[in-house]
């Protein structure tokens, strides 16, 4: 079993115990701008189901991880396993859990060698 498999299995067990939430990561890519109509063409939306552990750590802890000037009050750390994602989370994506959408502000991957095994996402409502 790879480290990615182990991390994913751990998150699934946490979800079974109510310690992780089911979530959906969403990326919207707008279509090209049409100068004739002055609007964007239809874009694409990609979603990926996942588990997330939400942690409302102190601003000091989050500031240490993501940068003092970036973190604002009320932001949450959401960790997501990499296995099974159809794309790596990035700033601007949306993480929705329990019907509540959070905007991804920044992402810090955790690697085992050169393979991402999980992502720490700074998110805000």
Image: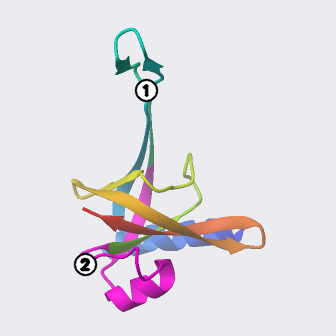
Image quadrant in which you'd find residue 105? bottom left
Name above or below for residue 26 compared with residue 57: above
Please tell me whether mark 1 sits on a helix, a strand or a loop: loop
The residue tagged 1 is 43
Drawn side of residue 114 relative to residue 105, left or right = right
Drawn side of residue 103 relative to residue 27, left or right = left
Between 69 and 55, the residue placed more toward the observer is 69
* Residue extent of the magenta highlight: 49-75
Q: Quadrant of the N terminus?
A: bottom right
Q: Position of residue 40 (x, y in %)?
A: 39, 22
The residue tagged 2 is 73
Name above or below for residue 62 compared with residue 81: below
Can you tell which of label 1 and label 2 is closer to the viewer?
Answer: 2
Crowding at mark 2 (Cα within 10 Å: few <14, some 14-19, many 20+): few
Image quadrant in which you'd find residue 60? bottom left
Magenta span contains residue 108: no
- In this view, the residue farthest toward the top is 36
């Amino acid at each position: 079993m790879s480290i990615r498999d182990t991390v994913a299995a751990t998150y699934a067990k946490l979800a079974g115990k109510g310690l992780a939430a089911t979530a959906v990561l969403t990326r919207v890519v707008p279509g090209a701008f049409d100068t004739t109509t002055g609007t964007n063409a239809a874009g694409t939306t990609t979603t990926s189901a996942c588990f997330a552990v939400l942690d409302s750590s102190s601003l000091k802890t989050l500031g240490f991880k993501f940068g003092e000037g970036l973190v604002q009050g009320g932001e949450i750390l959401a960790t997501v396993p990499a296995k099974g994602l159809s794309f790596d989370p990035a700033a601007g994506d949306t993480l929705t859990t329990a019907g509540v959408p959070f905007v991804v502000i920044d992402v810090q991957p955790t690697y085992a060698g050169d393979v991402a095994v999980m992502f720490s996402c700074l998110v805000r409502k």
